[in-house]
Amino acid sequence: MEFFNLIKKNVTKLNQNEKALLEYLFVLKENLKNHTIRDIAAKNFTSPNAIVRLCKKLGFSGYVEFRESYCNAISWEKSMIKLTSLDEQLVKTKQLINPEVLHHVLKKMYISEKIAIFAVGLSRTIAEDLYLKLISIGKNCQFFVDPHVMHFNAKTLNENDLVFSISASGLSDNPIYATTISKAAGATTVSITGFSNNPLAELTHYQFYGMIREIYIDGIDVSGRLGLNYIVDYIFTEYLKAYVL
């Protein structure tokens, strides 16, 4: 995850041509290890020096370090997805929780005037659980699942507010759109998603990742979301320790 965090931190430094080149590198995925810098330059009608500059802007010493870091990140992601039990899902989910991110989110939860929660589909039950937990301790919290209501209320948020967006895939259009509006309005945004490099996580200020087991029956999503439930309970428990008990 450090690789993708580094990319997210520095991607705004890139110009349009560099962003297009980065997208090409990402498309190659693990096959990138079989390509030299000259291969990449030739296929993109650019120079090796331009690729080196791109990698340095992203925080790497050069193309070789970028390539190795990216391939290692992909390998680690694949190994994390190979789950063998519910217990392992929980253990790996806990390993993915960044203490620094947790600290900032807990502090923002404490000082926020309003907390909004966005979710659709099966993730609604997880969002509702977080909502019920927060109102039980007197937090001003709102829970939205209807897209129109979600988008309308996102416009009313400001820099004093906090948003939790929950999506197992991180691909759900409505939470992404509502989160985009909230972020533009000045609210602090937090995503809780499955373990992947997904659009919702890339959009938010802070990210939590849970291990999930993807299961589809006749095209219907019945994937286990135990990892996401664990994150919600973990965040709430740590909040109680820090600011309530």
Image: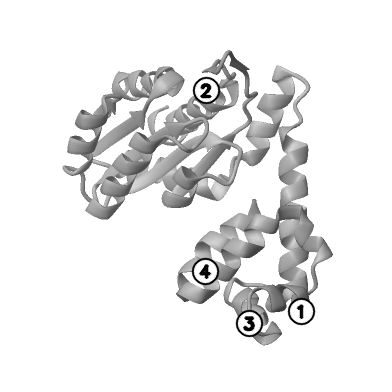
Separation of disc 4 and disc 3 at Cα?
13 Å
Q: Which residue is mark 3?
A: 46
Q: Nearer the viewer, mark 2 or mark 4?
A: 4
Q: x and y percent of residue 50 in the render?
A: 62, 83
**Dot 4, crowdedness within 10 Å: few (<14), some or many (≥20)?**
some
Separation of disc 2 and disc 4 at Cα?
35 Å
Circles 3 and 2 in contact, beta carbons < 8 Å: no
Disc 3, SS: loop
Comes first in the chain, label 3 or label 2: 3
Q: Residue at x 63, y 24 (%)?
A: 214
Q: Nearer the viewer, mark 4 or mark 3?
A: 3
Q: Indicate whether 28 appears above or below 210.
A: below
Which residue type does callout 4 highlight?
Answer: Lys
Separation of disc 4 and disc 1 at Cα?
18 Å
Q: Which residue is mark 2?
A: 229
Which residue type does callout 1 highlight?
Answer: Arg
Comes first in the chain, label 1 or label 3: 1
